[in-house]
Image (tube, grey):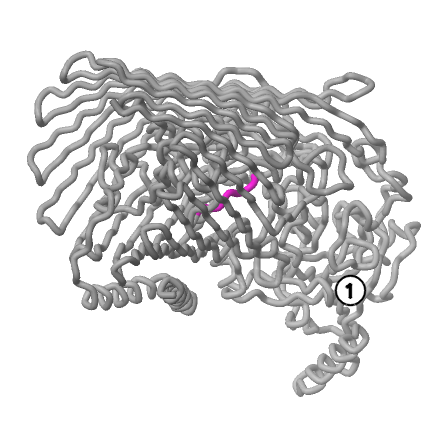
């Protein structure tokens, strides 16, 4: 009964907070509000609490730190939690986290990560601190990453370019894989479920004397799924993939460790479509899509003395795809796409403990990147180099204060140099609550498409899109041939592309209003003033427009993220998460303010002036997102279970290129102003409910049943990455010999 | 409903104009909606690359004074003011015709656009190849042409009379949510106000 009361209490607290927040729509007021609330709670609660098992993360500072002590917003997803929810791929796990949205790519397929309202392009995904490459339409496809070998997932929100450089603008997701454990440890798991989805993996870790080894292998296959019956071909075509992962360690001496890590991934997808050509003829096509990625990371670290530790590492990763579709019957190639990317990095880092109050981390390295693809009208291998140095100082002047200041300098052969500073501070008032604040600069390098694209659309009016690195040469060539009618910009301004830069603020608190209730609240603001967007640069004599990319767009995202976790008992844990988000284009706001933007009522066809408060913001952002989760675990009975409710508020879509089945995805903007306002058509808000229950037998066997999306929510046109209800059966065998 | 709206528009405009004491206007100007003006539509279907079949590549001409379409055989005369073909709108002057009609596109609400500008009129088409003078937006995904809300084309005719014009729809029957695959395009629905008197006020 008391559980129930407590439960009601926490729900009320959550609702109260979120209600308060909703009522006040300007972020500057949140800051005030938050300070008042927190100070109020702090005065009320001053009792000592027993500290829970310390959770340690590495991503935020590149050194191991207790999660509780970090001055920036960081969250951690443990292996236990991943097991309990019974997920298989990274997207399954991330879409249940507060403030993260898994969004489809530009053609409506795929799964990319949106963080603090910023596109997937702006979040760096790492495996053991090293970047995963191979973005398509800006997204790292999250289904490429299995969760079977994951020890924990660390998510740092806010820019981390001061440590990680490009792409760490919105934040960093770092997947920490399992390492050789003490003694030996192993697992064999098999999951079978809806859509003939079968996942089998095994892992084994062993330490013997100076040697340690961990090996992991996974095979995943699925028939895919189809959301609309009137279309041939599938929303997600059948595919199978293999992942292997190896980690070896050797203790060279008391002070020196060497290690070798590696991963290999291969995927084959089988496509089969019927495409209707404009004259009504139906053409059947089929073919395979192949994806490879692999990486290798040798590392050596040496502890010179109690104060100085140095690490040298080399990392290489390659990613390639090859897709060929053929017309059935004529056997001619209808679509062909090849892409190969390579990334190499050599880095040396040093850590120096001056004393208990001062700790310094520094590093320097070089990156070599190359790309070669049929997408840019030629098969030239494009290369770029980056040299970088970073410095981070941690200072604990008083027990209650913790200050981390970092700066990184990158110098790139294509887009020049970047300086990315960051300052974070934490102030602990007492054991029950602390303030955190950070201000930092993030950056994202222009992507390959923005640099090298050479696209000419001869049908449909005719236009060309040329990347910043190729546009000048192409324009000069066309001018020589007398094809250019006029330039729309000064020629000296064309073809110069800089990295996109953000300035971000994060301010938050972690406090315990009740003995077993923990609240995490973070306010964020990201401002980017030089977003890359295509712009018309010249017109040919045939009246065709030539576009290139320029740093012209300005936008911001701001909001509040809150998590309330209540430990109802040792067995039951309940949490509520909520994110309020505003993501808007600054230029659109100024256009609306100057009275240039109207909207047309589609029924009466009358145009009205749009008011600033009627502008909703950027596409694909929900103003409200949230989750409620309950986790149960009884070690004695060997039972664990979970129920998770995931909510995503209404949002608009636009700029979609239709989906692979040829269905068109109508833009939310239906009233003739090219922006998303409250009078437009939105994608409805939705709720997905996931359940899991598992029983462990005689310490070695595990049986799990899970149902994802139990109410079978689907939206075939707008949300093709939600597959409908999935039943799964999971069987596992595990052993653990701790010597 | 529409007729009520039209009535109200006419009524309020009349009241507004009549109540303006300094203005010696006797003929009230009215907003007229012209429906489904064909602007070289196809005769059905598309070829393999999506081009319309059966287009004649000829403009449809319109005279504000007459309030109706001008026969294409009068293309070399000054009878017509504006011409429509596909997404292109031309005026009768410069490279397009022997007349003196010029125009410009302005931002504003059609109903609350009381006075034509003094200058800024050109013989340019709508839109120009560089993307200016644009009256519509194009959705790459759905291939739908949408008139931009709040764009008014102000026309100065050969005899220095003024008209304002707003494009409402590019599809036959002005569907609320046009479907490029099903609805017939190249049919203009627009409304206009023609001021027959020697004044810039509408």
Q: In which quarter of the image is residue A720?
A: top right
Quadrant location, the C terminus of chain B: bottom right
Q: Mark 1 lies on which chain?
A: B
Q: Where is residue A135 in the image (x, y as percent from the top left)?
A: 50, 30
Report whether B126 appears left or right of A477: right
Range covered by the magenta-colored residues: A100-104
Point out residue A413 in the picture as x, y percentages from the top left corner.
37, 23
From the viewer's side, name the closer residue of A120 and A503.
A120
* Residue at image mark 1: B159
Local SS, label 1 = loop
Work out whether residue A670 or residue A240 is closer to the camera in this orientation and state it.
A240
In this rendered view, identify the residue nearer to me: A729 or A288: A729
Q: Is residue B40 shown above or below A28?
A: above
Rendered residue at 62%/22% (across/down): A289
**Does residue A392 sit above or below A586 in this rendering?**
above
Quarter holding residue A28: bottom left
Residue toward you, A85 or A58: A85
State whether the magenta stretch is mostly helix, strand or loop. strand
Residue that appears at 24% across and 30% down: A390
- Outermost left residue: A355
- Examine the structure image and report whether residue A103 is included in the region drawn in magenta: yes
How many numbered circles does the render carry? 1
Q: Is residue A113 visible?
A: no
Residue B128 image offset from top left, x and y in percent:
67, 45
Q: Which image quadrant for residue B149? A: bottom right
In the rendered image, the vertical position of residue B51 relative to residue A28, given as above or below: above
Which image quarter holds the N terminus of chain B?
A: bottom right
Is residue A54 part of the magenta span, yes or no? no
């Amino acid at each position: 009964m008391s559980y129930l009361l407590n439960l009601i209490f926490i729900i009320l607290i959550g609702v109260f907070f979120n209600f308060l927040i909703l009522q006040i729509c300007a972020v500057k007021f949140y800051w005030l509000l938050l300070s008042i609330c927190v100070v109020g709670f702090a005065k009320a609660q001053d009792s000592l609490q027993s500290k829970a098992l310390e959770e340690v993360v590495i991503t935020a500072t590149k050194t191991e730190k207790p999660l509780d002590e970090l001055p920036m917003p960081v969250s951690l997803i443990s292996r236990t939690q991943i097991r309990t929810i019974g997920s298989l791929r990274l997207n399954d796990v991330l879409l249940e986290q507060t403030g993260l949205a898994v969004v489809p790519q530009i053609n409506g397929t795929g799964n990319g990560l949106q963080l603090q309202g910023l596109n997937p392009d702006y979040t760096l995904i790492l495996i053991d601190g090293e970047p995963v490459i191979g973005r398509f339409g800006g997204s790292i496809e999250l289904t490429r990453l299995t969760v079977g070998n994951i020890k924990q997932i660390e998510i740092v929100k806010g820019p981390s370019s001061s440590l990680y450089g490009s792409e760490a603008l919105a934040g960093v997701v770092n997947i920490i894989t399992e390492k050789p454990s003490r003694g030996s440890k192993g697992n064999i798991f098999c999951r079978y479920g809806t859509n003939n989805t079968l996942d089998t993996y095994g892992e084994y870790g062993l330490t013997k004397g100076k040697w340690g080894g961990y090996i992991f292998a996974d095979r995943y296959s699925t028939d895919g799924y189809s959301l609309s019956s009137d279309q041939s071909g599938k929303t997600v075509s059948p595919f199978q993939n293999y992942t292997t992962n190896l980690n070896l360690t050797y203790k060279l001496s008391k002070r020196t460790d060497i290690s070798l890590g590696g991963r290999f991934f291969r995927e084959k997808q089988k496509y089969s479509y019927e495409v209707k050509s404009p004259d009504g003829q139906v053409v059947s096509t089929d073919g395979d899509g192949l994806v490879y990625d692999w990486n290798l990371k040798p590392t050596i670290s040496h502890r010179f003395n109690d104060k100085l530790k140095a690490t040298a590492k080399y990392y290489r990763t390659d990613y390639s795809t090859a897709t060929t579709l053929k017309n059935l019957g004529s056997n001619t190639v209808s679509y062909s796409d090849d892409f190969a990317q390579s990334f190499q990095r050599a880095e040396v880092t040093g850590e120096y403990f001056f004393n208990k109050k001062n700790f310094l981390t520094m590093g320097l390295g070089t990156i070599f990147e190359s790309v070669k693809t049929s997408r840019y009208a030629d098969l030239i291998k494009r290369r770029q180099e980056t040299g970088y140095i970073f410095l981070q100082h941690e200072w604990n002047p008083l027990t209650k204060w913790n200050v981390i200041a970092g700066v990184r300098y990158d110098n790139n052969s294509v887009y020049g140099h970047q300086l990315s500073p960051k300052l974070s501070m934490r102030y602990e008032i007492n054991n029950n609550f602390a303030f955190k604040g950070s201000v930092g600069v993030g950056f994202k390098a222009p992507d390959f498409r923005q640099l090298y694209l050479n696209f000419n659309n001869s049908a449909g009016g005719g236009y060309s899109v040329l990347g910043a690195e190729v546009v000048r040469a192409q324009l000069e060539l066309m001018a020589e041939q007398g094809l250019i009618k006029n330039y729309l910009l000064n020629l000296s301004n064309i073809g110069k592309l800089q990295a996109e830069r953000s300035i971000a603020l994060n301010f938050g608190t972690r406090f315990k209003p009740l003995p077993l209730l923990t609240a995490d609240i973070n306010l964020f603001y990201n401002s980017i003033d030089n977003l890359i967007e295509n712009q018309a640069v010249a017109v040919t004599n045939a009246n065709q427009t030539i576009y290139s990319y320029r740093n012209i767009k300005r936008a911001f995202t701001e909001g509040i993220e809150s998590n309330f976790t209540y430990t109802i008992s040792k067995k039951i844990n309940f949490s509520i998460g909520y994110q309020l988000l505003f993501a808007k284009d600054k230029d659109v706001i100024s256009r609306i303010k100057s009275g240039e933007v109207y909207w047309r009522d589609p029924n009466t066809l009358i145009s009205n002036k749009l008011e600033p408060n009627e502008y909703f913001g950027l596409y694909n952002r929900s103003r409200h997102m949230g989750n409620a989760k309950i986790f149960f675990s009884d070690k004695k009975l060997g039972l664990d279970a979970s129920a998770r409710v995931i909510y995503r508020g209404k949002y608009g879509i636009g700029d979609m290129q239709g989906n692979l089945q040829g269905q068109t995805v109508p833009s939310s903007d239906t009233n003739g102003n090219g922006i998303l306002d409250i009078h437009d058509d939105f994608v409805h808000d939705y709720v997905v409910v996931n359940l899991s229950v598992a029983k462990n037998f005689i310490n070695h066997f595990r049986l799990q049943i899970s149902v994802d999306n139990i109410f079978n929510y689907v939206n075939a046109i707008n949300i093709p990455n939600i597959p409908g209800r999935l039943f799964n059966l999971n069987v596992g065998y595990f052993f653990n010999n701790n010597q | 409903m529409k007729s009520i709206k039209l009535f109200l528009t006419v009524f309020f405009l009349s009241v507004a104009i009549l109540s303006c004491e300094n203005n010696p206007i006797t003929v009230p100007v009215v907003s007229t909606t012209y429906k489904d003006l064909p602007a070289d539509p196809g005769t059905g279907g598309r070829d393999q690359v999506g081009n319309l079949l059966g287009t004649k590549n000829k403009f449809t001409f319109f005279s504000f004074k007459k309030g109706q379409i001008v026969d294409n055989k009068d293309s070399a005369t000054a009878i017509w003011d504006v011409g429509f073909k596909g997404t292109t709108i031309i005026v009768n002057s410069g490279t397009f015709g022997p007349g003196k009609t010029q125009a410009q596109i302005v931002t504003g609400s059609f109903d609350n656009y009381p006075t034509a500008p003094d200058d800024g009129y050109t013989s340019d088409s709508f839109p120009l190849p560089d993307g200016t003078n644009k009256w519509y937006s194009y959705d790459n995904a759905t291939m739908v042409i949408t008139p931009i809300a709040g764009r008014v084309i102000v026309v100065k005719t050969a005899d220095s009379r003024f008209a304002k014009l707003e494009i409402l729809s590019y599809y036959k029957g002005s569907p609320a949510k046009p479907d490029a695959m099903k609805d017939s395009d190249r049919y203009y629905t627009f409304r206009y106000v023609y001021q027959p008197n020697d004044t810039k006020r509408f």
